[in-house]
Image (cartoon, rainbow, N blue to C red):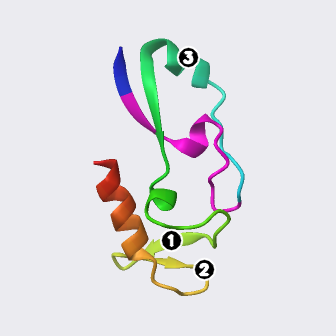
């Protein structure tokens, strides 16, 4: 069975910035075809649960408080690879 990396919040893990999940309703259909490997780049990059929401601006990632959290997102992305 093929492996597929999937955001951990999409399978029901409560790792979103607000401590909730974002489970997709068709997750069981995916499990028929793939071995899902859950991964949260934010958490793997060292961010907490819960945490302030973040967004990309001008090639960097900033929390809503204005803190540059780019290094956490880059580290999480590197670990995913």
Q: Is residue 69 above or below residue 17?
A: below
Disc 3 and disc 2: Cα gap in Å? Answer: 35 Å
Numbered label attached to residue 55: 1
Residue depicted at x 44% and y 55%: 41
Numbered label attached to residue 29: 3
Which quadrant is home to the N terminus? top left
Q: Which mark sits nearer the N-terminus, 3 or 1?
A: 3
Q: Which mark sits nearer the N-terminus, 2 or 1?
A: 1
First to last magenta residue range: 4-18
Do residues under tags 3 and 1 come within 8 Å of each other at their CB atoms?
no
Q: Which mark sits nearer the N-terminus, 3 or 2?
A: 3
Q: Is mark 1 on a helix, strand or loop?
A: strand
Q: In this view, does 65 lie above or below 37?
A: below
Give the x, y percent position of residue 74: 34, 66
* In the foreground, 36 or 57: 36
Q: Is residue 38 left or right of residue 3?
A: right
Instruction: Give neighbour class at mark 1: few <14, some 14-19, many 20+ (Cα, 10 Å).
Output: some
- The residue pinned by badge 2 equals 64
Do residues under tags 2 and 1 come within 8 Å of each other at their CB atoms?
yes
Give the x, y percent position of residue 56: 44, 72
Judge whether residue 74 is colored magenta.
no
Q: What element carries label 2?
A: loop
Disc 2 and disc 1: Cα gap in Å? Answer: 8 Å
Q: Is residue 59 left or right of residue 39?
A: left
Residue 35 sits in quarter: top left
Instruction: Give neighbour class at mark 3: few <14, some 14-19, many 20+ (Cα, 10 Å).
Output: few
Residue depicted at x 64% and y 69%: 51
């Amino acid at each position: 069975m093929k492996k597929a990396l999937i955001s951990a919040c999409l399978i029901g893990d409560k790792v979103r910035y607000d401590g909730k999940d974002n489970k997709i309703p068709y997750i069981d259909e995916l499990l028929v075809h793939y071995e899902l490997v859950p991964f949260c780049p934010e958490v793997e990059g060292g961010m907490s649960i819960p945490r302030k929401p973040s967004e990309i601006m001008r090639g960097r990632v900033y929390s809503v408080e204005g803190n540059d959290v780019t290094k956490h997102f880059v580290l999480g992305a590197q670990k995913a690879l």
